[in-house]
């Protein structure tokens, strides 16, 4: 049935919408009236733009003299702008402005004659004849003294700015479609300062279990739509204007916010869990300095019973490890289970001297808001850690030489291809050394292949320790090794190789055998755009010269 919006519309028993639909205005403002004989209640009378129509509709419902209470949910002009005029029209009689003390501190500047009825001084209630109203305090849900009004008789909640909407299309009663939900979300994203404040207000509204919600803006919400809207609002990130101090267009800001949220989700999905809990520890430490450490025990589905992921964070950093068997902790002062929708992923433990009730309440509230996010991140960390362990094992088989534990030829050429490309693009110097053990065949012939293997392994260890982590040390084949040195000109690489030659010459290998031998090396620097094979061949030719000139030498050119 199509509603006649030019007339008062009864939305619940003796409750009327008496507002005016301003053409082409996505930010409609509503006025409501509770008909209650000589103690009738006018709710948010509105601005001078809507006042003529509002007054006409009011007269159709009840005489002006019957208005005893005027509820002003806040002090904005779209709510109170007409009151000076309205007050001048009231006939003599007792009436009150019903509001919060924080609103009164601003409204008093209008110098109205109507006395105030302060809800916070009257136990958050108003008894008007046989009608009883309750007031729901929702601080900072638009401004510090924000509140909602609940009619116990009809279970109608006048929600002030909460659950309002912005929409190009006006419907007195909300329609269950995505466009309306988006309008509700957009309204709250720019109007509410934070998710925490909005959720606290929603908690208090849900406690009343309203049958109908009549907001100041948007559309009236029937019972069946209340829960779906609240559930969506709980996930909303508010404070839209925090995005930019110059741009005020909420539609532009909303688009930016949506993009940022997607980016944020991708960042979170790739963030290291250890960094998250380290930051958490530091923040907790600032609030409660006596906290010694935090331990998180992970037990996702993919972990076997004998494997548990344990992360411990303290002032020294984060220690992450898999341990065998179940983990049982004691002497902790606070524990919270970390759960997703599907399962308990693990638990977080706080270790500290005895905590006061106030500090325990701090932890309860903190983890109420972050434990789900921690659980999701922990589950990802466990799965990632398991995949990494499996990946490392596979990679080791593919790119690591099983004897020396150095990189093999396959990895070497892959590393060279990537590093040469970077060198060409960025212009940094790149050097390469080919190293060979002098007379290695004699070592095998005299001492056997086991000792030969021992020599190779110990030399590999020396080479690994002698070069930087960014250098690539690889076994090239047999007794030959290659070292790739990015950001190293020929002069530096040659000097480095000469130093290592002397170390090897003085070293005694294979324990009691005390074997001594020498190495030869050929070193060269990469020439712009030359093939990798040419690069290696030139170093190999230098190695040949070192051997030809008596061995135990380094040739660089």
Image: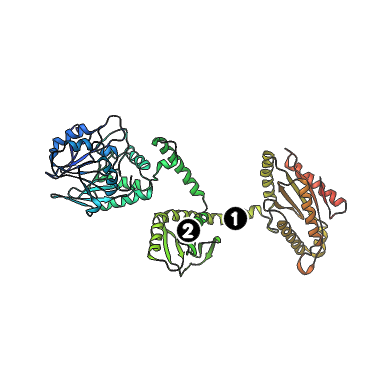
What's the residue at 69%, 49% (across, down)? 412
Give the mark nearest the N terminus, 1 or 2.
2
In the rendered image, the vertical position of residue 256 relative to residue 349, given as above or below: above
What's the residue at 27%, 53% (across, down)? 207
Q: Give x and y (percent) for residue 4.
A: 19, 32
Query: How would you rate the neighbour count of disc 2 (Cα within 10 Å): few for under 14, some for 14-19, many for 20 or more?
Result: few
Judged by depth in the image, the label closer to the viewer, 1 or 2, is 2
Q: Give x and y (percent) for residue 176.
A: 29, 40
Residue at the limit of the structure toward the top, as seen here:
23
For the C terminus, the image quarter is top right
Q: In the figure, is residue 373 to the left or right of 227?
A: right
What's the residue at 76%, 44% (across, down)? 525
In the rendered image, the vertical position of residue 83 relative to residue 228, given as above or below: above
Q: Give x and y (percent) for residue 475.
A: 72, 53
Residue at the limit of the structure toward the right, as seen here:
549
The quarter holding residue 416 reads top right
In the rendered image, the vertical position of residue 426 relative to residue 303, given as above or below: above
In the rendered image, the vertical position of residue 498 relative to residue 80, given as above or below: below
Q: In the figure, is residue 327 to the left or right of 406?
A: left
Query: How would you rate the neighbour count of disc 1 (Cα within 10 Å): few for under 14, some for 14-19, many for 20 or more?
Result: few
| Residue 300 showing in the rendered view | no
For the N terminus, the image quarter is top left
Residue under circle 2?
Answer: 286
Q: Give x and y (percent) for residue 280.
A: 48, 56
Tally the marks: 2
Residue under circle 1?
Answer: 392
Q: Secondary structure at mark 2?
A: helix
């Amino acid at each position: 049935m199509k509603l006649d919006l030019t007339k008062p519309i009864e939305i619940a028993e003796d409750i009327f919408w008496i507002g005016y639909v301003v053409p082409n205005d996505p930010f409609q403002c509503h006025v409501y009236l509770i008909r209650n004989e000589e103690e009738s209640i006018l709710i948010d009378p509105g601005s001078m733009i809507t006042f003529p129509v509002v007054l006409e509709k009011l007269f159709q419902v009840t005489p002006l003299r019957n208005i005893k209470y005027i509820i002003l949910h806040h002090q904005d002009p779209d709510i109170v702008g007409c009151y000076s005029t309205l007050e001048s029209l009231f006939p003599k009689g007792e009436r009150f402005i019903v509001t919060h003390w924080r609103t009164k501190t601003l409204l008093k500047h209008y110098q109205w004659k109507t006395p105030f009825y302060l809800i916070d001084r009257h136990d958050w209630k108003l008894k008007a004849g046989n009608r009883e109203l309750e007031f729901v305090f929702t601080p900072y849900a638009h401004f510090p003294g924000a509140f909602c009004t609940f009619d116990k008789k009809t279970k109608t909640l006048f929600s002030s700015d909460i659950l309002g909407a912005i929409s190009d299309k006006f419907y007195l009663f909300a329609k269950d479609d995505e466009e309306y939900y988006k309008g509700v979300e957009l309204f709250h994203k720019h109007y509410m300062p934070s998710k925490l404040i909005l959720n606290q207000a929603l908690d208090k509204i849900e406690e009343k279990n309203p049958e109908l919600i009549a907001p100041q803006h948007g559309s009236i919400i029937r019972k069946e739509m209340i829960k779906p809207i609240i559930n969506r609002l709980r996930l909303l990130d508010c404070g839209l204007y925090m995005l930019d101090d110059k741009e005020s267009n909420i539609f532009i800001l909303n688009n930016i916010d949506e993009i940022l949220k997607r980016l944020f989700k991708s960042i979170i999905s790739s963030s290291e869990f250890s960094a998250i809990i380290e930051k958490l520890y530091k923040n907790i430490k600032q609030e409660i300095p006596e906290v010694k450490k935090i331990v998180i025990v992970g037990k996702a589905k993919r972990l076997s019973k004998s494997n548990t992921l344990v992360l411990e964070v303290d002032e020294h950093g984060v220690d992450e490890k898999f341990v065998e068997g179940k983990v049982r902790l004691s002497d902790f002062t606070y524990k919270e289970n970390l759960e997703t929708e599907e399962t308990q992923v693990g638990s977080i433990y706080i270790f500290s001297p005895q905590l006061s009730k106030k500090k325990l309440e701090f932890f309860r509230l903190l983890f109420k808001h972050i434990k789900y996010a921690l659980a999701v991140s922990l589950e990802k960390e466990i799965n990632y850690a398991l995949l990494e362990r499996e990946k490392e094992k596979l990679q080791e088989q593919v790119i690591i030489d099983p004897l020396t534990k150095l990189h093999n030829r396959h990895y070497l050429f892959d590393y060279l291809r990537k590093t040469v490309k970077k060198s060409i693009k960025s212009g940094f110097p790149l050097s390469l050394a080919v190293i060979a053990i002098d007379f290695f065949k004699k070592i095998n012939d005299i001492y056997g292949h086991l000792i030969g293997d021992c020599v190779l392994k110990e030399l590999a260890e020396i080479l690994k320790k002698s070069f930087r982590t960014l250098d690539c040390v690889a076994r090239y084949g047999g007794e030959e090794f290659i070292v790739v040195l990015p950001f190293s000109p020929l002069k530096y690489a040659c000097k480095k190789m000469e130093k290592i030659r002397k170390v090897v010459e003085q070293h005694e290998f294979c324990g009691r055998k005390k074997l001594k031998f020498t190495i030869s090396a050929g070193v060269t620097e990469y020439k712009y755009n030359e093939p990798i094979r040419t690069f290696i061949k030139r170093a190999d030719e230098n190695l040949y010269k070192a051997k030809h000139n008596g061995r135990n030498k380094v040739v660089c050119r």
